[in-house]
Image: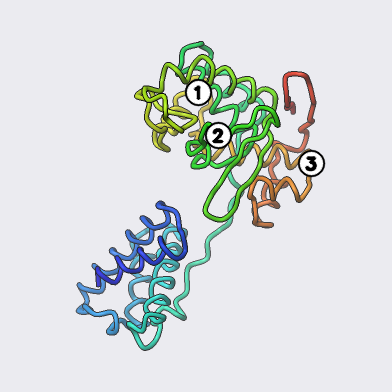
Amino acid sequence: MNQDIHNFIQYLHQEKQTSENTEVSYERDLKKMILYLTAHGVDRIDAVTPEVLNSYVIELEQSGLKPATVSRSVASMKAFFHYEELEQRTSADPAFELKAPKVEKKAPTILTTEQTNRLLAQPKDNSAKGLRDKAMLELLYATGIRVSELISLKLTDVNFDTGYITCVDSHKERMIPMTPVAKDALVRYIKDGRPQLVKDENSIWLFTNCSGDAMSRQGFWKLIKSYGKRAGIESEITPHMLRHSFAAHINRVFRIKSYWDLFAYQSSRFRTSFREQPCLKAIAFKSSNSGFSWST
C-alpha cells in the first residue's frame, strides 16, 4: 500500500501541481492510516472497507487530536481513495461517505496597527542583514503576499519603474503595487545590502540568507519571531500574521472586491471574519509622502 501512496503523491505533483507542503501533509496522513490498517489485518487497498475507515476516524477523535487535524486526515483519505477508484485499484470508494468532524471557524489572529508599526520599526541597523530584514518586512506587509511568494521572488520580479512586483504560482500571475516605504526599503537593500550577502553574482533570488543562498520559510519565521520579541509583542507572531493583518487593515478602508482578488483572498467567509475584528473599528487611513500610515 505504500507504493499506492507514492503513486498518489506523484499524481498530485504532476497532474494537480500541488505544493510541496500539501504533498507532505497528504503523505504523512496516509502513512498513519496505513499503520492503522495493517495493525487491523488490512494489507491491500481493495480490502479497505468504509467500516474500518470510520473506526480509524473515531480513534483519531478519541486520541485527543484537534478537529481540524482529524478533518485534514479525512480529506487526505477521501482524495486518496477517489484516486484509487479512478485507477481501478478498488471497485468502490470506501471513503465516499466518510464524515469529517465539524471545525469551528475562527477569525485569523492579527496585529493591531500600533503593534504592526512597532514590528516594522525593529530592523534599525544599516548592515546587510538589517537592510534585508527591513525590506522583507515592509514588502510583506505592504503587499499582503504569502511568505512562500516573498522568499520565491526573483530580481526580475521587481519593476521599480512601475512600482510593482510580480508573483507567479502554478495557477496564475499577479501584479502587486508596492508602497513608497516598501519600495525605498527594497532599493536600499538591493543597492547596499544584497551585494554583501550574495556570493554568486548570477544568483536570481531577491532575498538570500547570510550565506548567499535562497531564504527559507524557517529562516524567515525565526527572523520575524525575533523582531516580535524586540517590539514587545507578547503573542506569538507568525509570518502569515502580517498577511492577515494587511488584509484586515486594508479591508476597513477599501472594501473593494478587486483588492481581495489582487491579494488572492478567495473565501467570502474569510473576508467576513475580518470585518468582525473589534480592534479595526476605528482604523483611519492616511496618505503621506512616506507611504501608507495607519492609526486607530
Residue at image point 70% right, 31% down: 162
Q: Position of residue 167 (x, y in %)?
A: 58, 43
Residue at x 65%, y 55% (from the top left corner): 266
Colour scheme shown? rainbow
The mark nearer the N terminus, 1 or 3, is 1
Q: Position of residue 159 (x, y in %)?
A: 63, 31
Task: Name the amino acid, label 3.
Answer: Phe
Q: Is residue 234 left or right of residue 175?
A: left
* Mark-to-mark CA distance, 2 and 1: 20 Å
How many angstroms separate mark 2 from mark 3 (CA)? 30 Å
Is disc 2 surrounded by few (<14), some (14 to 19) or many (20+) residues within 10 Å?
few
Residue for badge 2: 156
**Along the line of sight, the residue nearer the viewer: 130 or 241:** 130
State the SS at label 1.
helix
| Residue at the outermost front position | 202
> Label 2 is placed on what type of residue?
Thr
Q: Mark 2 or mark 1: which comes first in sequence?
A: 1
- SS for dot 3: loop
Position above or below: 68 against 202 = below
User: On the rendered image, what quadrant is the C terminus found in?
Assistant: top right
Q: As displayed, is residue 57 above or below residue 221? A: below
How far is the residue under mark 1 from the one under mark 3?
Answer: 28 Å
Q: What residue would you read off at disc 1?
A: 133
